[in-house]
Amino acid sequence: MIAMARIEAAAELVALLADEGVQHLFINPGTDTAPVQEALSAARSAGAPHPRAVLCIHEHVALSAAIGHHFASGRPQAVMVHVDAGTLNLGGSIHNAQRNRVPVVVFAGRAPYTTAADVRGHRDSAIHWQQEQLDQAGVLRPFGKWHMEVPRGRELAPIVRRALQVVQSDPRGPAYVMLPREALMEPGAGELPARLRAPVPAGPNPAALRELAAILADARQPVIVAGRSGAHLPSVAALVRIAELLGAPVVDQRDRVNFPAEHPLWAMGGGDGTLRRADAVLLLDVEVPWVPAVAAPPGDARILQIDVDCAKVTMPLWSFPVELALTADTRAALPELEEALCALATPARRRAWEERRREVEAELVDARVGWGRRAASHEPADAADAALAALDRSLPDDAIVIEEAVTNRPAVQRQVRRPPGRYFGHGSPALGFAMGGALGVKLARPEAPVVAVCGDGAFNFGVPTAAFFSAHRTGAPFVAVILNNRSYHASKRPVLNLYPDGAAAAAQDFPETELTPEFDYALLARACGGDGRAVETPGDVEEAVRWALGVAAGGQCAVVDVRLPPP
Ligand SMILES: Cc1ncc(C[n+]2csc(CCOP(=O)(O)OP(=O)(O)O)c2C)c(N)n1
Ligand SMILES: [Mg+2]
């Protein structure tokens, strides 16, 4: 219990968020949030604990920043938006919060209930009738875990505690709390209830873990597919030890750095045949193990899984043939798996594992030679690889990369090397994460240079004007490297793939995906208080990125507009 003078519920909300370790409140205000604005101001002038308010002039940026902040800090997050309209503007970012399992509470105002002028917070504008919807929470329902409205001021504290518990319990994800204005202005609980700790993450069932280890130990071609296990940094080292012990290649889906790219067992995306040869596949925190039509393991391969959410019920058609699914947090399971494998490591098995390791490593090294050639090539088809290799050379050790490179994602994976904890992939389908994401990462790790690498389409989806605004206002400048092919390549490619002899291909007619006339992204950055440069050849990227990092170190966002050949 935190004893407080009997104060307005809105003030308790501010105190609770601070107590829960929420560092920033990403907010876009309206008539509904006035009590919270007042409470934040009172806390600021009293020097009382409070999250720092970050004004976001588009809600999509607010929630994207919360996602980025969580990636970089591991902390729970809070966003506050204006009634139904602000909720709708969260747009695809709410989907991204769901798919990335981000523990974020989205607070939204709710139209006041009462018209009586003697009730504090009552309706005082025509807009209060219009903004009320039959089912405001319905907007969030498909993406959120839980939602609730605060009916009275004194219920706010237990509901906020509960919301933060829900978002931080496995599988984590967003929750939605609606705050009518009268409730915010009523007296609060008086004594704040204690924090509701999230349930302790599941550890692996010992017998099932032994079974899983035994299958791996006797596999001829085991392959490990890692999705997000690297979000916990010690898990990267644990995975390295397991892969080395077994001599198993690691397919890293690169939503995080799950496995060091420098390691000879790193098999990147597995498209080189690694998966097709597997007779056992271990999935670690993987959302989508493979795309059957692209590169799948053989039908008789034994599929094993470790994840806090094995069944993935929020994805309707998740029917990968998992033989043994172990519900467990990989943080706890990987060290135990290592132990279980060591217990099975007879001299004969060790010899077989070591021999396999030598073979697999030799094969994977060949693939790298090819990537190196592309990085050094002057062919237009390799321009993205060359530009990204140059970007990689220009990054200081402590730089953090946010990737939303779409069709150039494989090129980023081939060429950009980051240490664990310094790379965050978009990892979900709704575009527009990188700009707000970079803002959130920079707020969480102000000491690190932050570089967003994104497609030109992704850049625009990210409402860059709003992201630059908040970055400059809060002193969180970042660099945006735009892989500018003047195209939605990802939306053009399927036309060619599905209709190779079709009308569009014959006439080379793709007006739906051409991002022309061209933007002047450098000028756009300058209009927002930042700076920018366009580079026409990969050879100029290195110098331009170094310049941009200097601009960001001086407090301004900087854009590097990398002109790539249109696809
Ligand atoms: C919010 C949202 N709208 C639309 C799409 C569909 N979409 C997927 S990729 C893409 C084009 C991305 O263009 P760009 O960022 O320039 O990358 P490129 O395809 O050129 O590599 C679009 C429109 C999406 N994923 N998310
Ligand atoms: Mg593009």
Image (cartoon, rainbow, N blue to C red):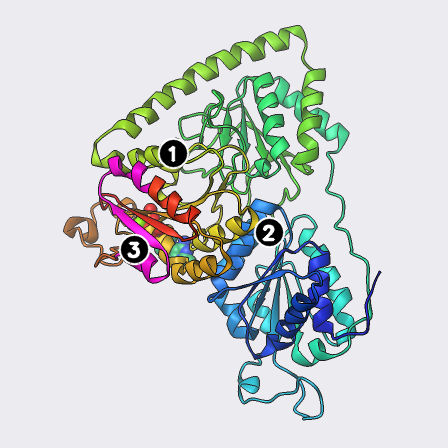
Q: Nearer the viewer, residue 214 or 137?
A: 137
Q: Which residue does the numbered mark 3 point to in the structure image? A: 521
Say if the magenta span includes residue 531: yes
- Mark 2 or mark 3: whose residue is earlier in sequence: 2
Location of the C terminus by quadrant is top left
Residue sitting at x 61%, y 21%: 241
Residue 316 can be seen, yes or no: no
Q: Quadrant of residue 87?
A: bottom right
Disc 1/disc 2 C-alpha distance (Å): 28 Å
Location of the N terminus by quadrant is bottom right
Q: Residues within 10 Å of mark 3 (few under 14, many from 20)?
A: many
**Dot 2 amino acid type:** Val
Q: Which residue does the numbered mark 2 point to in the structure image? A: 102
Question: Which label is found at residue 392?
Answer: 1
Q: Is residue 298 left or right of residue 412?
A: right
Q: Residues within 10 Å of mark 2 (few under 14, many from 20)?
A: many
Question: Which label is found at residue 163?
Answer: none
Say if the magenta span includes residue 176: no
- Mark 1 or mark 2: whose residue is earlier in sequence: 2
**Span colored in magenta:** 520-545
Q: Residues within 10 Å of mark 1 (few under 14, many from 20)?
A: many
